[in-house]
Image (cartoon, grey):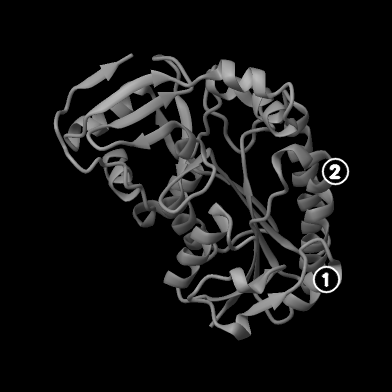
């Protein structure tokens, strides 16, 4: 049985990746600063107390594993100080132990453009956060030349059950009789979402493939407009009350909050298209690829009021 060390197991990606790997027969190990917060299903012997920023802790936790899943993320407003420093111990452990390292990529390294972006598109980060992601992926590519085997799976905004602080958590609220959707974008915009159970199931399948030392795949994801959401809710006979996300409140909050200042910088992702071309992943996995319809995603995310009253949408 293969063993995966997950750094960041309580995060959105780490939690779902652990479930996907378990479904494929992997044994899971976790490095945690607070072992008491480990998932209930994880046995005590598989919980390693330590800090992901400490190279000796990561090295100790990685002993005897086959895969290192890097699912950690510093606070959004501390990327400049922490992103590279947090990544380095994991990369060094992968180099030293010749491990495969799975890294969830995002779209920050690419400027908005009309056509979907494939794995060969030249990076052109429009923000400082994008520049940091370019640095992180460059370090991963360097690690692949030093003995590690790296798999980057690029995804959109996470969506899924049992998540915390995703954009869906911020924009959707289930009421007694309707779901309230505060859309951060206009009618025409296509936004790129990645459904976590699909993303992680497909990542687990990719790990079975004969991959090279450095591989990048783009998740096809879900490219959704307001109309797509509307149609999916109607299919489930769920009433929706629509409004626009209060960006003005975020604009004010950014004056006092470093976190909100960083979120505001990324507003362009809701105004201009940044979509991924996922044909390489589709071709590689074929019929094995997991892809959930939006109506089913709505069910799995619990976006259903206690009383189903209408299929009509109310726009305010």
Local secondary structure at mark 2? helix
Q: Position of residue 4 (x, y in %)?
A: 61, 72
Q: Position of residue 42 (x, y in %)?
A: 53, 77
Question: 257 and 59: which one is in front?
Answer: 257
Quadrant, the C terminus: top left
Q: Is residue 153 left or right of residue 161?
A: right
Residue name at image x 38 percent, y 23 percent = 225
| Numbered-mark total | 2
Local packing at callout 1 (Cα closer than 10 Å; few below 14, some 14-19, many 20+) is some
Q: Is residue 254 left or right of residue 154?
A: right
Which residue position is annotated with label 2?
81
Residue name at image x 49 percent, y 68 percent = 21
In this view of the protein, can residue 64 be seen by the observer? yes
Local secondary structure at mark 1? helix
Distance CA(mark 2)–CA(mark 1): 25 Å
Residue name at image x 21 percent, y 34 percent = 238
Q: Position of residue 145 (x, y in %)?
A: 81, 57
Question: 100 and 232: which one is in front?
Answer: 232
The part of the image, by quadrant, that contains residue 221 is top left
- Which label sits in the foreground, 2 or 1? 2
Which residue position is annotated with label 1?
96
Q: Position of residue 11 (x, y in %)?
A: 58, 55
Residue name at image x 71 percent, y 30 percent = 262
């Amino acid at each position: 049985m293969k063993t995966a060390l997950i750094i960041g197991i309580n995060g959105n990606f780490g939690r779902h990746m652990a479930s996907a790997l378990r479904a494929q027969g992997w044994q899971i190990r976790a490095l945690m600063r607070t072992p008491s917060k480990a998932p209930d299903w994880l046995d005590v012997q598989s919980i390693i107390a330590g800090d992901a920023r400490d190279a000796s802790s990561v090295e100790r936790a990685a002993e005897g594993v086959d895969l290192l899943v890097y699912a950690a993320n510093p606070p959004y407003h501390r990327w400049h100080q922490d992103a590279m420093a947090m990544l380095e111990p994991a990369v060094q452990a992968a180099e030293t132990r010749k491990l495969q390292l799975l890294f969830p990529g995002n779209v920050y390294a690419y400027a908005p453009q009309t056509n979907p972006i494939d794995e060969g598109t030249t990076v052109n980060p429009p923000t400082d956060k994008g520049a940091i992601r370019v640095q992180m992926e460059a370090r991963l590519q360097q690690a692949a030349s030093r003995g590690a085997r790296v798999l980057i799976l690029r995804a959109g905004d996470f969506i899924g059950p049992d998540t915390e602080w995703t954009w869906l958590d911020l924009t959707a609220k289930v009421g007694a009789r309707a779901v309230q959707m505060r859309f951060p974008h206009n009618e025409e915009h296509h936004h790129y979402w990645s459904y976590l159970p699909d993303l992680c199931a497909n990542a687990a399948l990719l790990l079975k493939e004969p991959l090279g030392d450095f591989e990048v795949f783009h998740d096809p994801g879900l490219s959704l407009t307001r109309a797509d959401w509307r149609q999916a809710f109607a299919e489930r006979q769920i009433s929706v009350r629509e409004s626009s996300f209060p960006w003005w409140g975020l604009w004010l909050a950014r004056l006092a909050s470093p976190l909100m200042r960083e979120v505001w910088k990324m507003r362009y992702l809701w105004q201009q298209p940044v979509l991924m071309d996922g044909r390489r992943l589709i071709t590689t996995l074929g019929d094995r690829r997991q892809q959930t319809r939006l109506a089913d995603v709505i069910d799995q995310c619990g976006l259903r009021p206690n009383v189903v009253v209408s299929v009509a949408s109310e726009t305010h």
